[in-house]
Image: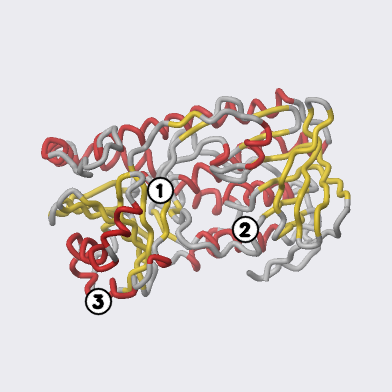
């Protein structure tokens, strides 16, 4: 089990950096800062990282960072399926999708791994540093301010409420960020017309695991190979889940089989709506990532849609840029608002460019609306256009998805000594 610290009720703790949120952005940042010698606390409100249907696509850009940190070989034992390209299936016809073999990275492929395995690995290595502290079942409720300056957070933990005072609070607590709400930061929504229903389906027979998405009769099904089962996602119109539930599970299972008949009896595992998880798709951003003593990164600053599976990778890129820009300053104990704004200056443009790419994809695939009764469909013209320009599109898409805009590299030193035994996940 990952080691967790449980402060007593009423405790007051002092640290250099307090990171709210133990997801990809928060935990990766905590690891890099601890490695660079910074005293850091990461707060995670759940008891572990084991939550299904989270982002699990790991792109070449993130694999490159793991390579630079010496963690790649260990991670590839977790993620043992590698895809040099991904395919799409339109109405029974295979259309080659993006490929990654031309990228200037150590790994020229994409891989999938349960997010909890990825996070457990990062937490295990972070635990080697005595200046890294992970608090599980610790929910940050409110910012602590001294005038306009954020100086810490109030936390609800297992033993009650306690306070953490820090030179910097990083809000990496996701698209529903409590730190962002408490800071009064406005969110700009882009209005995405779809949601996703995630579920597990047992494998039946031989199904091409290189085909990520299948579209048939205006419906799209995403399938991610998990070894002995598929993590599957059915694209639906936003707000239509209740209507789908009213139709019943049998209609829902048949709808899945209409798209991918080879799933066969595997769909029988969907015997309760409790096994179907609704992902309410958001695509939004904020215009002010920083306040004195506070920085928002990852989904708290820019929630991404599932298109391209780039959410985890954008979060990790934010973490690396934050560490590169702030680690030395935090180590010295002096971080200004201008320093924090440099993170936004570095990462905002890549995030917004990616979001524009996602908006374009949504408009072309699903239309720019969420009106009832409008079919989720791909036009004949778009299919023909995709085939004609396939060689160019595959290469370009591979670069945009695999590397993204402005990929980061590890620049922080390993300043801290490893004098704790790594904690096994």
Residue of label 2: 122
Q: Residues within 10 Å of mark 3 (few under 14, many from 20)?
A: some
Q: Earlier in the sequence, mark 3 or mark 1?
A: 3
Q: Inspect this view and state whether residue 323 appears.
A: no
**Residue 179: which quarter of the image?**
top right
Q: CA distance from mark 3 to mark 2?
A: 37 Å
Could you classify mark 1 by the number of other residues whose Cα lies within 10 Å: few (under 14), some (14-19), or many (20 or more)? Answer: some
Q: How far apart, in angstroms, are the residues tagged by discs 3 and 1?
A: 28 Å
| Residue for badge 1 | 309
Q: Which residue is mark 3?
A: 265
Most foreground residue, 203 or 377: 377
Q: CA distance from mark 2 to mark 1?
A: 20 Å
Q: Position of residue 73 (x, y in %)?
A: 53, 63
* Residue 300 visible in the picture: yes
Does residue 112 lie above or below 295 as drawn? below
**Marker disc for residue 200:** none
Question: Which residue lies at the image location 39% right of the left edge and 68% below the top edge?
Answer: 226
SS under mark 1: helix
């Amino acid at each position: 089990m990952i080691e967790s610290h449980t402060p007593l009720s009423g405790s007051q703790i002092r640290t250099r950096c307090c990171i709210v949120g133990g997801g990809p952005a928060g935990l990766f940042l905590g690891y890099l800062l601890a490695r660079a010698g910074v005293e850091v606390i990461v707060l995670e409100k759940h008891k572990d990282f084991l939550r299904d249907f989270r982002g699990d696509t790991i792109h070449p850009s993130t694999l490159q960072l793991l390579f630079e940190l010496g963690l790649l070989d260990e991670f590839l034992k977790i993620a043992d399926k590698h895809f040099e390209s991904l395919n799409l299936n339109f109405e029974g016809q295979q259309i080659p999708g993006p490929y990654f073999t031309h990228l200037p990275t150590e790994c020229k492929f994409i891989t999938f791994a349960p997010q909890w395995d990825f996070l457990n690995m990062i937490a295990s290595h972070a635990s080697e540093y005595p200046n890294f502290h992970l608090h599980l079942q610790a929910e940050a409720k409110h910012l602590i301010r001294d005038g306009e300056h954020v100086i810490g957070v109030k936390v609800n933990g297992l033993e009650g409420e306690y306070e953490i005072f820090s030179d910097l609070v990083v809000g990496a607590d996701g698209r529903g960020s409590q730190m962002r709400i408490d800071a009064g930061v406005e969110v700009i929504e882009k209005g995405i017309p779809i949601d996703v229903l995630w579920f597990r389906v047992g494998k039946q027979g031989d199904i091409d695991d290189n085909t990520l998405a299948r579209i048939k009769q205006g419906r799209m099904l995403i399938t991610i190979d998990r070894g002995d089962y598929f993590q599957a996602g059915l694209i639906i119109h936003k707000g239509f889940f209740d209507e789908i539930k009213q139709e019943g599970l049998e209609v829902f299972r048949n709808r899945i089989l209409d798209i991918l008949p080879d799933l066969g009896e595997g769909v029988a595992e969907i015997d309760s709506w409790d096994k179907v998880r609704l992902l309410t798709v958001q695509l939004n951003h904020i215009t002010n990532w920083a306040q004195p003593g506070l920085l928002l990164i990852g989904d708290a600053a820019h929630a991404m849609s599932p298109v391209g599976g780039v959410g985890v990778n954008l979060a990790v890129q934010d973490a690396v840029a934050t560490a590169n820009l702030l680690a030395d300053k935090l180590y010295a104990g002096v971080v200004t608002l201008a320093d924090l704004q440099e993170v936004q200056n570095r990462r905002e443009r890549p995030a917004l460019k990616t979001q524009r790419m996602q908006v374009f994809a949504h408009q072309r695939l699903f239309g720019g609306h969420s009106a009832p009764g409008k079919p989720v469909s791909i036009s004949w013209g778009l299919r023909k256009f995709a085939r004609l320009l396939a060689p160019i599109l595959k290469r370009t898409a591979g670069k945009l998805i695999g590397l993204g805009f402005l990929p980061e590299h590890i620049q922080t030193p390993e300043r801290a000594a490893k004098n704790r035994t790594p904690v096994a996940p």
